[in-house]
Image: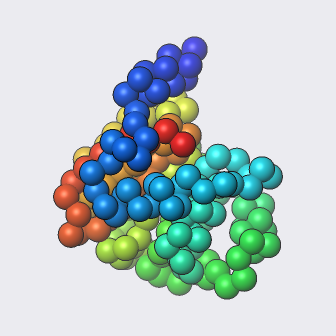
Amino acid sequence: MYRFIYYIKFLLSATNQHGVHSPFIYGFVTKGLYRKGNKDLSVTENVLVKSISYFSHKNIGLVTDSNELKIKLNTIFEELDYGSFPFDIIYANVLGKPFKTIGKQYIHNESMLIIEGVHATKKSRTMWNALKEQAHVRVTLDLYHCGIVFFRKEQAKEHFKIRI
């Protein structure tokens, strides 16, 4: 019941690309996230694949329970590196792992973090809100199914809710 009520609230407050006033985010939403996805992947996995394609990311950090996603990514992309720091993109689908802080040794200015299920429970929503408040977090995208964090120092601190 909690998720349904929050989803309705999300839909009422979220926008599409026309509510975005950042050229960086507008380009990512229109040319990356709104592209057609793969039917064999979950919503969040599609966001990951579209992000890798749009930004041409190579160094990937996966925080998952299984190796299944890595196998899927290797069938779509030829040259991904899963062990080199700093990561270009970090993907996490493990709700129990705390993301209150992200070690700066794992990221660089152009890194992004994708977290699945930021609204799955009250605890995950609380962790998401705490992560958004960190000083080195500059831009966040709340897509309901997942959250995206950017660390770009040149970007003004902004939070967007986007329907995909």
**Residue 122 placed where, x, y %?**
46, 27
Q: Nearer the viewer, residue 57 or 93?
A: 57
Residue at left offset 27%, top offset 51%? 21
> In x, y percent, where is residue 162?
43, 42
Picture mark count: 0
* Residue 136 in sight from this viewpoint: yes
Location of residue 130 (image quadrant): top left
Percent x, y for residue 153?
Answer: 23, 69
Quick check: can you spot residue 118? no
Return the residue found at the far front: 18
- What residue lies at 49% left-to-right and 20% top-to-bottom? 8
Question: Image quadrant of residue 59?
Answer: bottom right
Quarter of the image where the C terminus is located: top right
Percent from the top left, x then y, of residue 134? Answer: 25, 53
Q: Is residue 101 left or right of residue 38?
A: left
Seen at 74% across and 55% down, the residue is 38
Residue beneath the point at 55% across and 32% down: 120
- Note whether 129 is above or below 38 in the view shown: above
Q: Residue 127, relative to residue 113: is it above or below?
A: above
The quadrant of the image that shows the N terminus is: top right
Would you place residue 78 above or below residue 33 in this image? below
Q: Nearer the viewer, residue 77 or 30?
A: 30
Q: Depth check: 79 or 27 in front?
A: 27
Establish if 119 lies above or below 95: above
Q: How is the image coloured?
A: rainbow
